[in-house]
Amino acid sequence: MKKIALVTCYFQPNYGSQLQAYATQLLFDKMNVPNETIRIDGLKKEINAAKYRYFLSHIGDVATIKDKFSTVKKLWALKTKGKDFKQNMAIRREMFHAFSSSRFHLSGFYGSKQELQQHAHDYEAFIVGSDQLWLPSNIEADYYTLNFVPTVIPKISLATSFGVSRLPKRQAVKAASFLRRLDFCSVREQSGQMLVKELTGRVVPIVCDPTILFSASDWENLVSPRRFYDEPYLFCYFLGNNPEQRKFVDKVRSLTGCKIVQLQHCDEYIHSDEDLPDYAPYNVGPAEFIQLIRDAEYVFTDSFHCSVFSMLYAKKFFTFRRYSSDSIVSTNGRLYSLLTLAGMENRLLRGDEDVNQCLLMPVSYDEVYHRFDELRKITRDFVEDALNKSGIVYDSDRR
């Protein structure tokens, strides 16, 4: 039996990217569908070159440059912040590499998209998703679009996200074209659903991020039962640079007496964060990331997937807006969508709210889990329908 090909962002040194890719694989493993994740090694150069051309063509776009400035700051920090910082970043990168190299069923090596296209008939179908794989730069890179897959091979989008609420004109035209080629399409957010309808006239379902398909008890198979820290702590995972949000966490530390554990400099180097935490571990891969969320007294984040795992583990958590406005590069929309779907809109903060009142906000997970169960059913129904119509055999009892 041929395998299905998973086109995911498994390789990025990013907790959400690797965990959603792993969850996608786990879904098909549990359905007893042979699968492998397409190795990116030989394709990276080609993909990155197209992305670089996109960013160069937007060199005058203030919003885009501001968004990529974080990458420049991180690279500059590696050169200027000394040996300890460089070693810490290397430790974290190795944790990601160890996870991606040991946890995924990876395909053979493909040296280019053309070579992958030549081998496309080796697969039953191609499945892309989830994460922000349809960002404007990724549309230009033309990999997660599945344009390289021949027309006769089924192409399925599973919970793929645009990451933004609107596309620039050039990428909108390209998106309209590749979206029409997909045999089955689902998205992760309402904004994505609206974009697909606007671009193609097609009404597609909103399904859940693959990480939500599995309960906390399912994820425990991946996570050590031991605690990372024995004492009570507040877990802090911020990707954006918003000082008022750190002040909020610091106030909670004063009120609760808990220590702060923070994963630092994950998206960019933030100098002011150096003085915030009591503990700043770097030997944290995707499994340890879940472990730190699981055992925290409170979780503070501006991350989609940190919010997901906070809810899966029934934590007292607060999610903060990463961007101050909904600009074209803002990813606030996926946070709005996630918390709205879960009925947890009151957990979305700016950072200037009254801390005492926020700590008194009730957290009831019965309704959240009821909604998650509904989303899981919608998602599995979508996947099973796509597999059925593609002629792919699966085990519907393996959940």
Image (cartoon, rainbow, N blue to C red):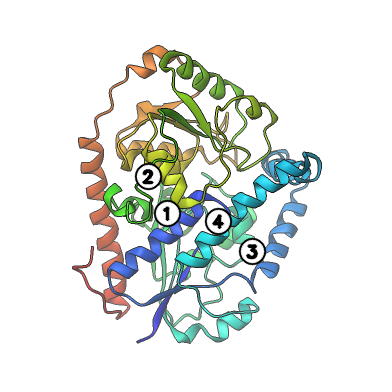
Separation of disc 3 and disc 2 at Cα?
42 Å
Q: Which residue is mark 2?
A: 226
Q: Going 29% across and 81% down the picture, which residue do you hit?
A: 391
Say whether marks 1 and 2 touch (CB < 8 Å). no
> N-terminal of the two: label 1 or label 2?
1
Whichever of callouts 1 and 4 sits on the residue coming sooner in the sequence is 4
Pointer 3: what residue? 141
- Residue kind at label 3, given as amino acid type: Ala
Query: To which quarter of the image does residue 185 belong?
Result: bottom left
Dot 3 or dot 2, earlier in sequence: 3
Task: Report the mark closest to the observer, 2 or 4.
Answer: 2
Q: Residues within 10 Å of mark 3 (few under 14, many from 20)?
A: many
Give left or right: position of 282 versus 379.
right
Residue 341, by quadrant, is top left
Tags 3 and 1 touching, CB below 8 Å: no
Residue pointed to by mark 1: 197
Marks 2 and 4, the one that precedes in the sequence: 4
Viewed as shown, does residue 78 lie left or right of 137? right
Q: Residues within 10 Å of mark 1 (few under 14, many from 20)?
A: some
| Frontmost residue, 181 versus 110 | 110
The Cα atoms of the two marked residues, 1 and 2, are separated by 47 Å
Amino acid type at mark 2: Arg
Q: Secondary structure at mark 3?
A: helix
Circle 4: residue type? Phe
Q: What's the CA distance linking mark 3 and mark 1?
A: 23 Å
Residue 96 has which mark? 4
**Of helix, strand and loop, which one carries label 1?**
helix
